[in-house]
Amino acid sequence: MAISTNKILRLSFSSAGGKTFTLSILNPREDLSQAEILSVMDRMIEEDILMTTSGALTGVKDIKIVNTVVNDLFDPVQP
């Protein structure tokens, strides 16, 4: 039983097929700025780095840092 915390950077893009594609990055650098993140996202779009099931990435939709706390209340017995 333990408590753990996680930080995830979620980058959301719009795609050519009109859907949202989200890329999650665990434990992002603490000092990331919005300008740095937008610069990387724009470069990913311009250089067609990723292809999704709904087509190429076409724009930046959202940027979030998500913090979670997990309180594990039960650990199964190991054989």
Image (cartoon, rainbow, N blue to C red):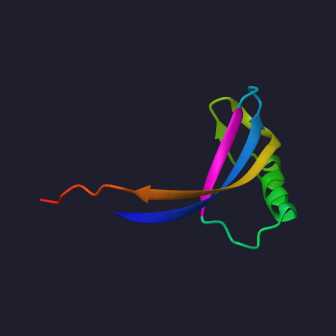
Q: Which residues are magenta?
A: 20-26
- Most extreme residue toward the bottom is 31
- Magenta stretch encompasses residue 21: yes
For the point 83% across and 48% down, the residue is 46
Q: Residue furthest left?
A: 79
> On the image, which quarter does residue 17 sit in?
top right
Q: Is residue 15 above or below residue 73?
A: above
* Horizontal side, residue 46 vs residue 75: left or right: right
In the drawing, does residue 62 fall left or right of residue 3?
A: right
Q: Nearer the viewer, residue 52 or 35?
A: 35
x, y percent for residue 37: 79, 60
Residue at the image position 68 percent from the left and 38 percent from the top: 21
* Residue drawn where x is 71% and y is 34% of the image: 20
Q: Nearer the viewer, residue 71 or 38?
A: 71
> Residue 64's spot in the image, x, y percent?
73, 52
The residue drawn where x is 77% and y is 36% is 14
Horizontally, is 40 left or right of 4 in the view?
right
Residue 30, percent from left and from top = 71, 72
Does residue 56 lie above or below 2 as drawn?
A: above
